[in-house]
Image (tube, helix red, strand yellow):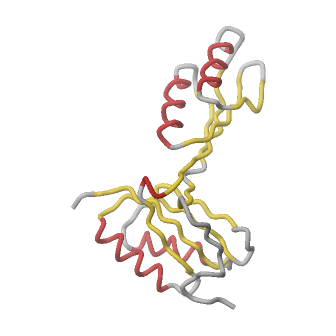
Amino acid sequence: MKQHRHTLSILVENKFGVLARIAGLFSGRGFNIDTLNVAPTTDARFSRMTVVVKGDDSVLTQIIRQLEKLINVIEVQDFHTDEAVERELMLMKVAADSKTRSEVMQIVDVFRAKIVDVQSDSLVVETVGPQRKLDAFLDLLGKFGVLEMTRTGRIAMKRGTVYRPGRATKRARK
């Protein structure tokens, strides 16, 4: 069976325990979550989860059906690459002394990244973009010495029609 990377957007009620139930559903079926992001939407009653997993299409279809049955889940979407705008945020602390600082800054500029902290021996750089861009940026700065790094994981939003939680949901919530 061929494994594919899937980006799921899950609209849920913003309630205690929802994240644990959803993560448990994935782990209970042997799916490793590559990245997971959760944040409230413009309507505080709802949160949007972006989950990236690799797996067989037929098994993932079963998981989506099971997610849709959970009482706190409003909507599940499996985004294909051309259907969504996807971004990730990365903060990286790079070794940069007086000899290497200008070269690091040139790479930062080419990638349209931003220096957010300057110390005598390092720079903290922020960059946003698709995973490929961040991976390439990391590869280039790796030769200077990446001292620390953190990434948000992928977030995604469907292209086109505006979606307003609570108005056009499958199940009305009170």
- Horizontal arrangement in the rendering, residue 35 relative to residue 174 (left or right): left
Q: Position of residue 20 (x, y in %)?
A: 57, 74
Q: Is residue 100 left or right of residue 55?
A: right
User: Residue 172 is drawn in which quadrant?
Assistant: bottom right
Q: Position of residue 79 (x, y in %)?
A: 45, 62
Q: Residue at x 42, y 61 (%)?
A: 32
Instruction: Tell me: residue 109, above or below residue 17.
Output: above
Q: Residue furthest front?
A: 161
Q: Quadrant of the N terminus?
A: bottom left
x then y, percent, for residue 53? 42, 60
Residue at point 77% right, 30% down? 117
Residue ID at (52%, 43%)? 130
User: Residue lying farthest top?
Assistant: 99
Total numbered labels placed on residues in the image: 0
- Vertical position of residue 168 compared to residue 109: above or below: below
Residue 78, image x, y percentages: 44, 66
As drawn, is 60 to the left or to the right of 91?
left
Residue at position x 47%, y 86% in the image: 69
